[in-house]
Amino acid sequence: MSHQWQERKRPVRLEARYEFKDYGTLRDFLDEAADLSEQEGLYPDMGFGRDYVNITIHVDEGEEELGEKHHHFAELLDTLVKKFT
Amino acid sequence: MSHQWQERKRPVRLEARYEFKDYGTLRDFLDEAADLSEQEGLYPDMGFGRDYVNITIHVDEGEEELGEKHHHFAELLDTLVKKFT
């Protein structure tokens, strides 16, 4: 996994920040990231402005630990973002 | 302006939260909201998950007060969201 992702506690989660050269590129990334969410059934919290996206992959209600699916999704996003940065 | 928008201080900003019935609807909203940003040259911070979007319209660097353009953008988003909720 990319060094960008940080695992945090209370609540347990993975966080990363991606930056983009312009808003159009950011939009294309968000659109493909949303496709990934629908494909994987995993919906991170994403916060974005003109040139950045902060991503938080959180566990679902009732889960106490990050699992393979969360780390896998982080890797998918890292692979995706390489197309856009 | 919708009662949804709240004006906050330090830093001065407008905030609102919209909720959506499903992720596809939320995606359509985000896409059209991004069109509005490009049209108006105003890029709020947006944080979203599977069924909600939190929006923060902030002043630009060097600005100290919210102006007409910020309130106008809030109104445009309120009009837009009615298509999707």
Image: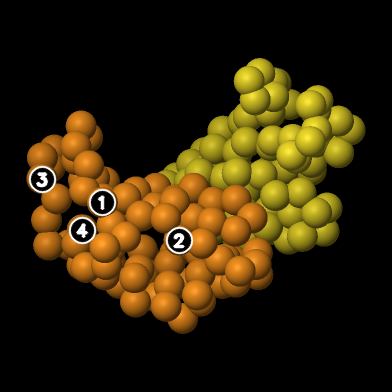
Chain colours: A orange, B yellow
For the residues beneath circles 2 and 3, the answer to whether they share a chain is yes
Taking the spot 27% from the left edge, 67% from the top edge, the residue there is: A2
For the residues beneath circles 3 and 1, the answer to whether they share a chain is yes
Q: Position of residue A33 (x, y in %)?
A: 43, 67
A80 w.r.t. B74: above or below:
below
Q: Give the crowd class for mark 1: few <14, some 14-19, many >=20 residues within 10 Å.
A: few
Q: Is residue A35 visible?
A: no
Taking the spot 74% from the left edge, 35% from the top edge, the residue there is: B59
Q: Secondary structure at mark 3?
A: loop
Q: CA distance from mark 1 to mark 2?
A: 13 Å
Q: Secondary structure at mark 1?
A: strand
Q: CA distance from mark 2 to mark 4?
A: 17 Å
Label disc, if present, on residue A59 of the rendered structure: none
Q: Is residue B10 visible?
A: yes
User: Which residue occupies the foreground of this view, A66 or B78?
Assistant: A66
Specify the subunit that label 4 lies on. Answer: A
Name the residue beneath numbered marker 1: A6
Specify the subunit that label 1 lies on. Answer: A
Name the residue beneath numbered marker 2: A18
Figure quadrant of residue B75: top right
A11 w.r.t. B41: above or below:
above
